[in-house]
Amino acid sequence: MTDATLIDSTELNRFCAEVRVRATRMALIELRDAALAADVVQDSLLKLVSNYKSRPADEWAPLFYSILRNRITDMHRRRKVEKIFDFFFSSDEEEDQAPGWEQIADEALGPEQQIANGQLAGRIADAISTLSPRQREAFLLREMEGLSIVDTAAAMKVSEGSVKTHHMRALTRLRELLESDHPAKV
């Protein structure tokens, strides 16, 4: 193994470690199942590492989020088929599990702050989940991941103008939804 390959592997490992938590939060918002979100992120990271490790580091984020988006879409399709089978073959005793919003809360804080953060994270996630899929994706990639418009467009496989439009519409809608929770004092 050459020094350049070792450095690239170290950079890729660092990228994966940095992106894992944020990507899991994104997947959790989309899938509403913590274990499933973690699995989807792990699969996406594995595909990035196995197929794209030789690509330049500045291409990893758009590639990863494109892979993640495809994995989430696949999971939605799979769940749709599973719901059909569950309708015909499951018992009424099974209940859906609530999403693990408490996992988003900062664990370094005290119990009251953790509860407040978990509740706030739940309200934000609920607001984000009301966005259209493209608005949600543009918002999460731009705001939570800090990707540029160019990188977001590459990850979403749309034009830069489309990213700007979806992002602005998402911001406008979220402001409307979250202002109703906490109206400004005049």
Image (cartoon, rainbow, N blue to C red):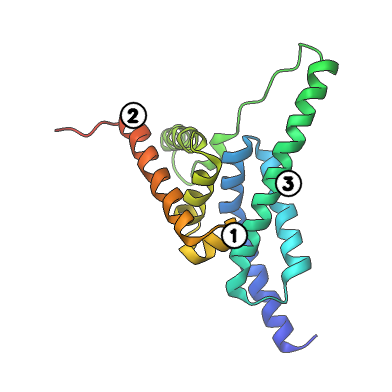
43 on left or right of 20: right
Q: Secondary structure at mark 1?
A: helix
Which label belongs to residue 155? 1
In depth, the one of 66 and 185 nearer the eye is 66
Residue 12 showing in the rendered view: yes
**Do the residues bearing badges 3 and 2 touch, measured as CB atoms within 8 Å?**
no
- Residue drawn at x 42%, y 44% is 170
In depth, the one of 13 and 158 nearer the eye is 158
Assign the N terminus to one quadrant of the image: bottom right
Choose the circle earlier in sequence order: 2 or 1. 1
Choose the circle earlier in sequence order: 3 or 1. 3
18 on left or right of 125: right
Categorize mark 2 by other alpha carbons within 10 Å: few (<14), some (14-19), many (20+).
few
Q: What residue did someone put label 2 on?
A: 181
> What's under tag 1, amino acid-wise?
Ala
Distance of label 3 from label 2 (alpha carbons): 33 Å
Q: Is residue 172 above or below residue 150?
A: above
